Amino acid sequence: MLGQKPLPRKFYMRDPKFVARDLLGKILVRRLNGHLLEGIIVETEAYYGVDDPASRAKNSMKKYNAPMWGEVGLAFIYNVHNNWMFNVVAHEPNGIGAVLIRAIEPLRGINIMMANRKVHSIINLTNGPGRLTKALKIDKELNCTDLTDDKNPIFISNGRFIDEQRIGRTHRIGVSKDLDIELRFYLKDNPFVSKGRIRSSNQS
DNA sequence: AGGAAGATCTACT
DNA sequence: GTAGATCTTCCTA
């Protein structure tokens, strides 16, 4: 049994950095061929609109980035270097934004995730945005799925309370130009956080 | 037609 | 730890 309620739409109707922070400890659930794959979200990044140089929404609205302007709580999925990135649309009313899920701690269906990724160590199974989408078989097919509905093939449910003390914060990983504020959030004591490096010139 | 991108894997110094 | 190949999707021209 799930035992957990999906997060309501209101949860995502806030500044993306607050949504990114508060998604830590929540549960990402994937229904796949009658199986249930679950993981705890342990690393996220917030992305903003046309003025964010690292955002897919930079410059202007295009067909592929349109979900970032749209209803919050929907999946926004795109491809980078042959890897699918899984985001949740999140912003204040009439705003633009999304939260990238960068890593999860595998909870359930680990054997299926391993078969999807062909790795033998759990620690490397879902500790990166491209790795977790491969493990959970997330691709463009799931773009714009409503993540607030637990009947859907993928959604996000309520999880554990996370003490503020356990949350670390840095600049975003892999981006060439970052904003001044730190927009990556992760659980300090969790071994399933990704190993990516910060490359932006604006890092402090 | 050509190139860049929020990444990953492999093979090295 | 660092460098290079990878070969998708969407951008710009």
Image (tube, coloured by chain):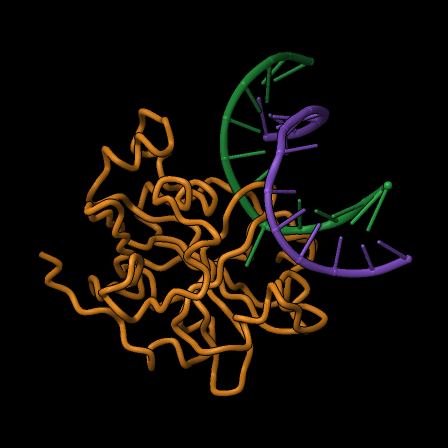
Chain colours: A orange, B green, C purple
Q: In the rendering, at what x and y percent does residue A59 appear? A: 72, 70
Q: Nearer the viewer, residue A178 or A106?
A: A106
Q: Left or right: where does residue A91 sit relative to residue B1?
A: left
Q: Nearer the viewer, residue A60 or A200?
A: A60
Q: In the rendering, at what x and y percent does residue A106 appear? A: 26, 43
* A123 in relation to A29, above or below: above
Q: Left or right: where does residue C9 sit relative to residue A185?
A: right
Quadrant that contains the C terminus of chain A? bottom right
Residue A9 image-quadrant placement: bottom left
Q: In the rendering, at what x and y percent does residue A3 appear? A: 10, 62
Q: Visible in this render: residue A44?
A: no
Quadrant that contains the N terminus of chain A? bottom left
Q: Residue at x 55, y 56 (%)?
A: A172
Residue A107 image-quadrant placement: top left
Residue A152 image-quadrant placement: bottom left
Q: Visible in this render: residue A189?
A: yes
Q: Residue at x 49, y 57 (%)?
A: A77
Q: Residue at x 35, y 36 (%)?
A: A125
Q: Residue at x 70, y 73 (%)?
A: A60
Q: Left or right: where does residue A141 sit relative to residue C3?
A: left
Q: In the rendering, at what x and y percent does residue A37 appear? A: 24, 47
Number of disc labels: 0
* A47 in relation to A71, above or below: above
